[in-house]
Image (cartoon, coloured by chain):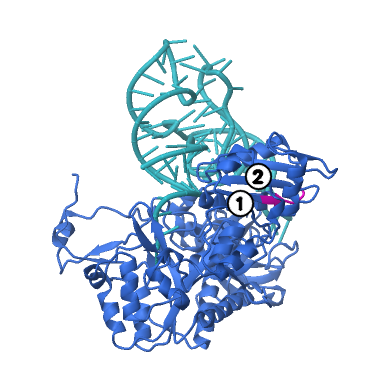
Amino acid sequence: MYRTNTCGELRLADAGNTITLAGWVQKTRDLGGMTFVDLRDRYGITQLVFNMETNPEQCRLARDLGREFVVRATGKVAERSNKNPNMPTGQVEILVDKLEILNAAETPPFTIEENSDGGDELRMKYRYLDMRRAPLQRNLMLRHRMAQSVRHYLDLQGFIEVETPVMIKSTPEGARDFVVPSRMNPGQFYALPQSPQMFKQLLMVSGYDRYMQIVKCFRDEDLRADRQPEFTQIDCEMAFVEQDDILSVFEGLAKHLFREVLQVEFDKPFLKLPYKEAMALYGSDKPDLRFPMQIKQFRDSKRETRNAEESEITHTVLSHDTSRITLSGFPVFDEAEYIGGLVATGCSEYSRKQLDELTEFVKKPQIGAKGLIYVKYGTDGSVKSSVDKYFDAAALQGWAEATGAKPGDLLLILAGKRDKTLKALGELRLEMGRKLGLMAENQYVPLWVVDFPLVEWDEETNRFYAMHHPFTAPKPEDVPMLDINPGLVHANAYDLVINGVEIGGGSIRIHDAKLQKRMFEVLGFTDEQAEYRFGFLMNAFKFGAPPHGGIAFGFDRWVSLFAGLNSIRDVIAFPKNNQGRDVMQDSPSVIDDEQLKELGIRVEGD
RNA sequence: GGGUAUGUAGUUCAGUUGGUUAGAAUGCCGGCCUGUCACGCCGGAGGUCGCGAGUUCGAGUCUCGUCGUACCCGCCA
C-alpha cells in the first residue's frame, strides 16, 4: 500500500501502530535537536517528528524540506507530550523512521493557508495551488455534495438525466452566443448553448416526462462577481404538469438541499409573491425578505389598472391609508410621477453626515435618484424634515400615520419616474438593511416570484421582447389580451429567490403550434425567421406535444449562497477573470494561420 | 460602451507640501536552538515604484496617454 492512512484520521487510539502517510509539507519547525513537519493532504494535517539523537539522517533530511514538497513518511503513531487541542489529529504525532521526498517544490508565490496572503489575480494564475487551500477544498466539496444531493432527490422523483449537445444552432435572441466554426462546413458555425432549452422541450415531445441535467451553459456577456461566461445549471423539465406541480416538486428540491446540506428546515410553504407586488413593495423582482421593510407608496400616477385582480394587488400594496398623505406645494412632488418612502425603524437620530451619505448613495449614477427627502420623527414627538419649508407639522404627521412611522423612526422618500424611483427605493432598502444589520448571514428566506409579464417593450428597437423566453406560455385567461395589449399579459413563469439572489427560474411552455406562432408574431418575427431559428421545434409540436414546463437553477449561485460567498468564482474550480480570461492558461489566445485557413476564417486587423 | 477604486520587494501593504541611499510585516537564504505547532533568537539578500511621454534643478508622489486588475451600471431571452 502506498499509504496506510490520510493526514486527517489518526487519533490516540492509533498510538503504537506503524503507518505510512503521504502529502504536502505545510510547514517545518527546526528546533536544532529535533524537527517538526506538518504534513497536509485534503483530509487534514498530521505532525511528523524527527529526532537528531535517535535518527540523525532522517532528521537532517527533514530540516531541508521546503514548503509544498511532496513526501511520504513511515513511522510509529505516538501520543504527544504537548497536545494541540486546535487540530483534530493534535493528540498524536508520527515518530518517523523513513522519509522519502517524492517531489521537491519551488517556494509557492503565496501562502497555502486558511487565509492566504495572495491577491485575487495571483491566486487565479496559480489556481492549482489556491485549490490546495482548505476554503477552496471545502467549497468544492460542498459543490460535490449539493450535486449528489440534487441527483439523488430528482432520481427518487423519477427524473432521468439526459445529456444534450454542446454544439448547437445559434439562435440570436437573448444573450450573445459563443460560436464554434465548422471546418467541414466552411463559413458555418455552431453555437454553444445558453441553456438546453429546446432540447429539453423536445425530450418532452419524446415522452421522457421528467428530465434533469446538471449542465454547462455559455453566454458571451460581460462578467460580474455572480456571472461567468460558462456556468452550470440544474436544468429540469416535466410534462403533464401545471405551474403548481412544478413549484411543488422544486420547492421540495430546495427544502431537500437545505435539509441535507445545511440542516435547515422549512415547515411552511414558500411565499408566492406576484411580480408586480414584488416591484411595488420591494423595488425588485428578487427581494431580500430577511427583513420586512416595505416601500410605502405615496403616489403612483402611472399604474395601469385593468381588472379586479389588478386592483386587489393595488390594495395589498396600499395597505396603508393614503388619505392622510398631502403632497401639494413642493415642486419636486408636484412634478413626480411616483412618490414612495421607506420607514427606517429607530433611525430618527441620524446625523447630518449619515443623511448626507444616504443622499450620496441614492444619487450614485447606478441608482440615479436626484435627491433624498427625509423626515425624522423624534422620540420626544418632534418632527424635523428636509421639506419643512413646504409642509407643516400636521402634514408631516399625516405621512407618519399613513406609513406607520413611529416616534424614533426615520422616513426616507424618493420621487420621480415610476420605474426608476421604485428601483432606487429597492436599492435604498437594501442599503438600510445592510446598515442596520438586518440581513443575518445564517438566515434563509426563499420565495417564489410569480406572474411575470410575458413580454417587455423595448424603446430602442421598438418591439416586444420575451421577458423569459419565447416559449413561455401566457396565463390561459390572458391569452385574449395578446391581441389587445401584449404588455399586460401575464406569463406562466416563476423565479426562485433566496435572500435577494435569483437562484432559478422557469415557466410553463407553449405546446400548441398555433399559440407559439402567435407569440412569434407578437415578438415581431417573420414566419421565415421563426422557421429558420425554431422550425425544428415547431415541427416537433405538430406530432403530439404534451403540455410541459420546467425550471433551471444557477448551480454556482446556489452553491455560493450555501457557502456564504458573494462571488461564484470560489465555488468554481477554474473560473475566468473579469475580462473572461483564464489567466492560468492565458486563454483565449490566437490560433495559427493553418488553423484559420482550414476553417476559412480571416481575422480583421493585422 | 460608461462609472468608481487600484497597480511600490516573492507576497500583503506604508510612503507627508515633489527633495539625501524607497520602508514595514511576512516569506526566502545563512547561523544558533530537544517539545514546537503564528516556534524563538542573530545575521543577510531581495525594487524597471505597471508601461510610455510630459512638467520640474529634482517625480513613487503632479499632468496626459496606455496597459492590467477588482466592483458596479449598461448588457445577461
Badge 2 amino acid = Leu
In the image, is residue A343 part of the stretch drawn in magenta?
yes
Q: In the picture, residue A259 is in which quadrant?
A: bottom right
Q: Which residues are magenta?
A: A342-346
On the image, numbered disc 2 is attached to which residue? A327
Query: As drawn, is B28 to the left or to the right of A379?
Result: left
Q: Is residue A309 visible?
A: yes
On the image, numbered disc 1 is attached to which residue? A299
Whether pointer 1 and pointer 2 mark residues with C-beta atoms closer than 8 Å, the reply is: yes
Percent x, y for residue A429?
A: 63, 52
Question: For the stretch drawn in magenta, what is the main secondary structure?
Answer: strand
Query: As drawn, is A72 to the left or to the right of A204?
Result: right
In the picture, one chain is blue; tell me its letter: A
At label 2, counting other C-alpha atoms closer than 10 Å, the crowd grade (few under 14, some 14-19, many 20 or more) is: some
Residue situated in front as seen by the camera: A249 or A591: A249
Query: As drawn, is A250 to the left or to the right of A176?
Result: right
Badge 1 amino acid = Arg
